[in-house]
């Protein structure tokens, strides 16, 4: 067996010495050297002062060139393309893939119809009873408390987070504004200019209700409350909507009728 010695290391003949990386981890996710330290260790700072050689680019529009051709009957020169094209051409026309799948409106549960009283299961208004108004284009449900009864304003909520009750209100006389769409409920955040100051002080921006939202809320609540007062159970509906849903001790959930 033969050995070769170099720099106080020895390797077997025909095999290279394993090289270790310049940087190593002292802890999971923490490197020994920073990016700036490695920049100097590798000597990359020497290449900064040297300008990169500019490549000679052919002027635009010159895709061909003339070449001399031998032979007395060949004309002496010939125009040939600078870049050769493919030798074979595909006989099948290739088209970019087009995604024909379109988002469909989620199917509304049969138990949820306009005017159905729903129990909210998630969010800041969980446990409250709200009135279902309509389904938006995104599939979310547009509901309202009304605000005067239980403090729930016009909101969007997914049908997976509500329980449909058997209590229904005739809201055929309720006219909803046309601007109540998904874009109406999206919040817009304005970019703030960078200001000098303490970066550790975090300032929280509070959401303020716009005048348009207040106006639409009053319009919907006025017609919705009028529809509630016209129903047969008008005496109990106000207290029913104002009382949050809860389960008492010893109450069997599987036997409840909503």
Image: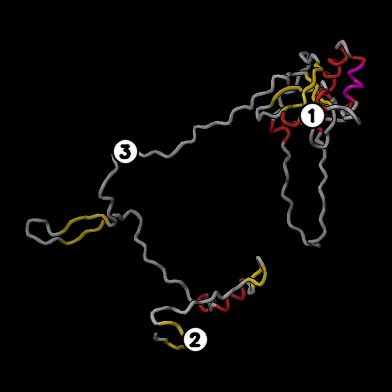
Q: Which mark is residue 92?
A: 3
Residue at the disc numbered 1 = 154
Where does the C terminus fall, quadrant-wise?
top right
Left or right, residue 256 beside residue 141 = right
Magenta span has 182? no
Q: Categorize mark 3 by other alpha carbons within 10 Å: few (<14), some (14-19), many (20+).
A: few
Q: Quadrant of residue 83?
A: bottom left
Q: Nearer the viewer, residue 153 or 48?
A: 153
User: Residue 5: x, y in percent?
Assistant: 45, 88
Q: Categorize mark 1 by other alpha carbons within 10 Å: few (<14), some (14-19), many (20+).
A: many
Q: Nearer the viewer, mark 3 or mark 2?
A: 2
Name the secondary structure under disc 1: loop
Left or right, residue 195 beside residue 73 = right
- Looking at the image, residue 80 lies above or below residue 183: below
Q: Which residues are magenta?
A: 236-241
Q: Nearer the viewer, mark 1 or mark 3?
A: 3
- Alpha carbon of mark 1 to alpha carbon of mark 3: how far? 55 Å
Q: Which mark is residue 9?
A: 2
């Amino acid at each position: 067996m033969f050995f070769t010695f170099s720099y106080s290391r020895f390797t077997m003949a025909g095999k290279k010495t394993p090289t270790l990386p310049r940087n190593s981890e002292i802890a999971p996710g923490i490197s020994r050297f920073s990016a700036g330290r490695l920049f100097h260790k590798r000597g990359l700072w020497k290449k900064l002062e040297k300008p990169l050689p500019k490549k000679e680019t052919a002027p635009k529009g010159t895709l061909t060139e003339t070449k001399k051709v031998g032979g007395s009957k060949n004309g002496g020169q010939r125009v040939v393309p600078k870049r050769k094209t493919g030798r074979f051409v595909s006989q099948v026309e290739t088209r970019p893939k087009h995604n024909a799948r379109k988002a469909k409106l989620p199917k509304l549960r049969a138990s949820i119809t306009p005017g159905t009283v729903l129990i909210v299961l998630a969010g800041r208004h969980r446990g409250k009873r709200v009135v279902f108004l309509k389904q938006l284009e995104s599939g979310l449900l547009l509901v309202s408390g009304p605000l005067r009864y239980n403090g729930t304003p016009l909101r969007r909520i997914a049908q997976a987070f509500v329980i449909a009750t058997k209590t229904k209100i005739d809201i055929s006389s309720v006219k909803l504004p046309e601007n109540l769409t998904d874009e109406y409920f999206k919040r817009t955040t304005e970019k703030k200019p960078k200001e000098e100051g303490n970066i550790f002080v975090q300032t929280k921006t509070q959401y303020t209700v716009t005048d348009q939202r207040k106006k639409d809320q009053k319009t919907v609540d006025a017609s919705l409350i009028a529809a509630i007062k016209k129903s047969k159970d008008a005496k109990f509906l106000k207290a029913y909507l104002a009382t949050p849903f809860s389960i008492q001790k010893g109450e069997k959930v599987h036997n409840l009728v909503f």
